[in-house]
Structure formats: C-alpha cells, structure tokens
Image (tube, coloured by chain):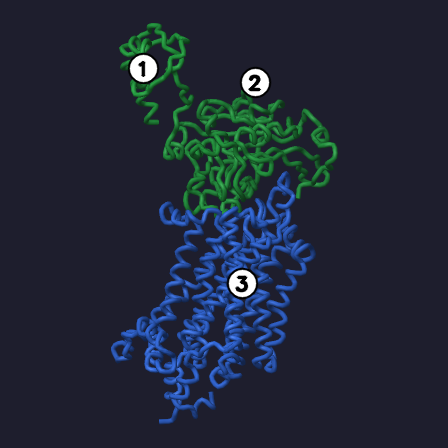
Amino acid sequence: MKQDNSRRAFLAAGLLTTVAVACNSKKSPFNPEEEVAASGEKVKLLSVDGEIIEVDKAFLKPVPHMPSLSNAEIRKGIEGKKFVMVIDLSRCKNLKKCQSACNHAHHIEDAQNWIKVYPMQDSDLTAPYWQPTTCLHCDEPPCVKVCPVDATFKRQDGIVLIDSDRCIGCRFCMAACPYSTRVFNWGDPELPEEIASQPYNAETSMPQKKGTVSKCDFCADMTRMGMLPHCVSACPNGVFFFGDLNEDSVTNGPETFRFSDLVKDKSGYRLMEDLGTKPSVYYLPPVNRNFKFEEGLPKDEPAAKKS
Amino acid sequence: MEKLKKFSPEKITSDLLPQKFGRRGVIWTIVLILICGIGAFAYIRQLKYGLVVTNMGDYVSWGIYISNFVFFVAISLVGSLITAIFRLADVPWRTPLTRISEMIAVSAITFASLIIIVDMGRPERLLNLFLHGRIQSPIMWDVVVISTYFCISLLLLYITLLPDIRIMINAKDKLGKPFAKFYRWLGGYWKGTEGQEKIRNRSITTLCIVIIPVAFCIHTVTSWLFATTYRPGWDSTNFGAYFVSGAFLVGAGGVVVAMYVFRWAYKLEHYITERHFDKMGKILVMLALLYLYFNVNEYLVPAFKMKKPEEEHLTMLFSGEYAPLFWFAIFIGMIIPILIVIFPKGRKPNAMFIAGVMVVIGAWFKRYLIVTPTLLHPFLPKYDAPAKFNHYFPSWEEWAIAMGSLAGVLLIITILARLFPVISIYKTITDHESELPS
C-alpha cells in the first residue's frame, strides 16, 4: 500500500521533469536508484498535464490492478454494500460449472469443494431437484459466534470471511455450521509455488494453509472490483444471481432483476429459516423448470435421496 | 476401622509413608512410559504432516481426541465430589479416599488440557486465545473454567498435603535424602503451629466451597461445546445436567478402581476397609441411577417424536452401525454395575472393582458415542466429499495418542503415589485420636 502511494505521488509530481532526462540515461525515471537496461522500445503515455510523453518500455513495471489491503480494512468490508445471492433452482441441471470455476479460481482441491450441487428430494412423492450451495453468509452466523479467536468474522457488507493467519484449527465453526459448508485443510494444501508464497489474503482466501478452516468467500475480491463471483459468471444457465441488497438489484450477467420483486414473485425462501441464522442466500423454488432432474444425473449414478 | 483403633500413630505413619516401587511397580511404570512414548511419537508425526494423519474428515471433524477430552474432564470432577462435597457434608469415612480422588482430579484435568491442544490444527497459535480471545465463544469459557479448576485442584491437593510433608521430612531416614530435600523445598516452612493450622483449615474450607460451582462449570461448559450447536443429538437442553451426572458416575467408578488397586498394591486393608467399598458402592448405585435417568431423558424424548434429523441419528444408535457400542455403553456403563452393586454382596471389594472398571470403560465409549455419531448426521446430506469422510474410525496415530494420554494420566497418578502418601497420614492419626475414648 505504502509503496503504491509513493509511486503514484512520484508520478504526479516529478514525471515531466525526469522523463526527459531518463529517456536518454540508464536510470529509471520512477526509481533513480535502479539500473535498468533500456529496451529501445518506446511507449506513449499521457502525463498528468495532458501531454503525451514517451518512455522506454523497460522502465515500466506491472502494478497490481488492485491496491493491496490491510487486514483491518479487509475485516471492515465495503461500506454501504450488503451483498446477497439468489439461486434459481428451476434453472439448475447439475452442470457443476460453478464448482469447477470456483475450485480453479481459489486453487482448491476437488476433495474440498466450497460449492456443492446436492440432489434433493423433500419427501417421497415430491420431485427431486438440484440444489447448489455456497456459504450462506448468514446475518446471524453460528460459526462466527463460536470462534474463540475472531478468525472468522462478519463484515459490514454481509460477507463472512476467514483469517487463516489467525485460525487455530479448533473446528468449532465446522461443528456449528448447520449447512456443512466449511472444509478443513487436514494436510498441506497442494498449491503452485507462486500462490503458496503469497501472504494470506482473506478476500481471496488464498493461499490455503495447513490446519485451518476454509469455505466460500462470496469472491470478496471480485465484488470489491465490482465484478461478479466466479460461480455466477461461470454458470451457463444463469442459476446464480448476485447483487447488493441496498441497491435492491441482483444480476447473473445477462439478466438483472429487482431483488425484492424477484423473491416476492417467485416465492423465494432461505435454507433452514427456522434455525434463525438469516442467510444472505435466497432460493427460488424449482417450479416451471428449464430441465428435467434426470438430465443432470451423471450416467452411472442413481438419484440420491435427501437424507 | 475397628482394627485401626489398636494402631499407634507410629504404626500408621510407617504403613502409609510412600513406598519404593516393587518389581511390579517398576514394570507398571515402564509400560506406562512406553505407551506415552508411542503416543508422543504419533504426535510428532501429526505435527509434521498435520491432522491428515488422523481419520477425521469434514463431517466427523471432532473424533477420539475430543471424546477423550470429555472423558478426562468428566473423571476429574471426582476431586470435587469426594473432597469438597463429602467434607462439607461431613462424611466421616471420607479420609482414606480424599487424597486418591484429588490425585485423579489433578492428573485428569492436566491431560484434558493437553489433549485439547493435540486436537488443534495449529497448536503453535495457542497464544491467539489470549491475544485475540473472544469471550463470547464457549471455548473461551472452557479455557477459563478449566484453568481455574486446575489451579483449585492443585491447591487443594497441596494444602491438604502440608502436614504430611512435615511427617515425611521427619522420616527422612526411611525415605532417603533426595526425597527429604524435595519435601523440604515443597513444604519445609510448614511447622503445624496453631496459626498455620487455622489458615490451612480455612483455606481448605474456602477451596471446597469454591470448587463445587467450578466443577459444575467445567463439565457444563464442556457439554455446551456440543449443546450450543444445532446438530441433532447435541441440540439438547438436558446436556449440562446429563454431562455432570455422568461425570460424577465415572469419577466415582475411577475412585473405586483406584481404591482397590492401592489397597492391594500398598497393603492398605486396614485403612481402606470393606466398609468403604460398601459406602462407595451405595454412592455408585445412586450416581448410576441418576445418569441412567438423564440418559432416558436424552434419548427417549426425541425418540418419541422422531423428528427427521433426530430419527437418523437415533436409528443409527439404537439399531444401526453404532448399536453394539451404544448398548455396550448403556449396559456395561450403567445397568450391569447397578445390578451388581445394588446387592450387599456386590459391594465387596472384588465385585466393586469389576463394577468400577465397567463404569469407567462404559463411560469412555459413551463419550465417543456422544461426539462421533452426531457428526455423521449433518442436516444436508453427506455428498460430493471424499468417500472416507462418510465414516470414522480412528487411525493408529489417534489411538496411540489417545492411549498415550490415558497412560499419561495413570503415570502422573503413579508418580504422585510414589512421592506422597495416598492416604493422608495426618488426618488418619487425628481421626484416630478423636475416636479414642479419652
């Protein structure tokens, strides 16, 4: 954060004066201490004064597209937001694109799926349906209530996250969660080196650490950038809607609805409402379905009943 | 006790002073150390590879470590029962049992705290409990009450030991120099003056009063680790009383076993008499009936309604995968001991020993049944997780660590019994003097 600030300040104040010199020397205009071999390839840039200047490409460095956030800022969450998800069960046919996109984006192993698509059947005579589950980011989260060290926390924007640098691995949150959404890193997580060496970020939930709990994070890093969570954009059937309760709108990308109308018109409900956990994820019942339940069945697996 | 009247204080002292281990004592201690060593080796493996060496999974995320923890907390409650409740109720025959029960309490509560650290995924972050502790979490309540109980139990053991330490310092010729040095370090300041005696008595009374609510707390809070969740099988308002009554039962069973073993090993037949077994037997029956009563409440009421999530859990216990273990715990842990001990013949030492062993073993499996089967029944179906998560049977590392911790408790008791008299010499002599016609 500090480094980024100073770089920007430097750009604003001293760019014009140094660029002229820098272009012909081996000193980088942005960091005179640093020796960089000029590549000879010039890039045109717009200065703060609105003039076009030319800088050698070698002097340019990639800057992370998001400023890095402190743990305290991550714990606060995004002001003025209250994230909410709507899952339309009439559209799901168990393609599990949500799951694979999620696993890919968060580098989680197949054994640890944060998203699961359950085959459900409420009673013997009613029709089975597919039910994707994420972390429900409850407003009265039982997991946060029981955490002894404040490692899992609820933010002002409604997202429940985990600080894996603080988690002591007691797994009380896993026992407390009635939705079985939490998973544990029983051994060393298998991660590519460049991910494993990063400092832990609770918004990306990466890198996973041995002996700590993890779960769906509502892609807090994507929402901070104003983008949709990976599961939402990966679903070809538009099952997942994501949005801000304060704006009263949810979208799956192509379609956008007024949240209050959607859950009213389609009789939205939440899982295990009777427990009083107040989830942030709403479900639309599987009526007027786009697909038959059987279409979602893997060829060799019979329908499992709700147990 | 009748025979004891003929004993002189010198005879009592020499009978009760700590004795050197015989051959059997040495073998017993070595075996315990070996079992602890295997447990330590397994724990080193767990530290290295993580909890992946256990057979726990995302469904059964608490296993044998946690049930062992509950067992230790339970058995440690006996210190408060025998020492505090008997003292406050002025039960005259308690003298030969108090020291034994305090030793059990201290060693069990020590290992309760150790085993909970073993269960942690990141034991090196233990300090986070103090740096970032949230007092709203039942785990923090447990940390507070267990450390309090540990301190009170240790103080109670120590303060009641003081006059005996003086006696042992005086008997240094018999006990050896290094021991005498240790005793002097521990309680050399104790002269038994009237002032000291007054403070000591007052402290014991205070501790005895304080330890009872703390003892209720440790096991109630431990039950709340389960009862504060939504899970069928744990979501019960009965849990606190159910746990506390079970704890008193296993504690009393443990004391009966220890009484029998010490009586046999140290030839204490004149001190721990058949009368003591008879009295403890009556208490054991009462506690077993009480625990059975809470069990009926705990299982029969939900079984009458058979709510869907409860149904699967109860069916698994009554007639499913866990039925053999469940009925074993009910019959061996409660019903058969009741049937043995309720008759005067069953309250003889040998029968009592068998009943006590049954109670303790039954209680250990009972704790396992409280923790594991519930976790196998989450609200949403078990689905799309590795197949091995759908069942639970502890790995060899878990067994080794669990058995190592049990051996550790016995080892601490053994060491304490080697260092200190298992029956208070001072109290036995004063009891004896007050009984003599003056």
Q: Is residue B283 visible?
A: no
Q: Is residue B430 above or below residue B43?
A: below
Q: Position of residue B329 (x, y in %)?
A: 62, 64
Identify the element where label 3 is drawn: helix
Mark 2 = which residue? A254
Q: Is residue A169 visible?
A: yes
Mark 3 = which residue? B35
Q: Position of residue A25 (x, y in %)?
A: 31, 11
Instruction: Name the residue at 40% across, 63% down.
Output: B150
Mark 1 = which residue? A29
Q: Around disc 3, counting alpha carbons within 10 Å, would you say few (fewer than 14), some (14 to 19), or many (20 or more)?
A: many
In this rendering, position of residue A290 left or right of residue B91: right
Instruction: Name the residue at 60% across, 74% down.
Output: B354
Chain to which mark 1 belongs: A
Q: Position of residue B146 (x, y in %)?
A: 42, 59
Q: Is residue A140 above or below residue B367?
A: above
Q: Position of residue A201 (x, y in %)?
A: 43, 33
Identify the element where label 2 is drawn: loop
Looking at the rendered structure, the kind of residue marked 3 is Ile
Identify the element where label 1 is drawn: loop
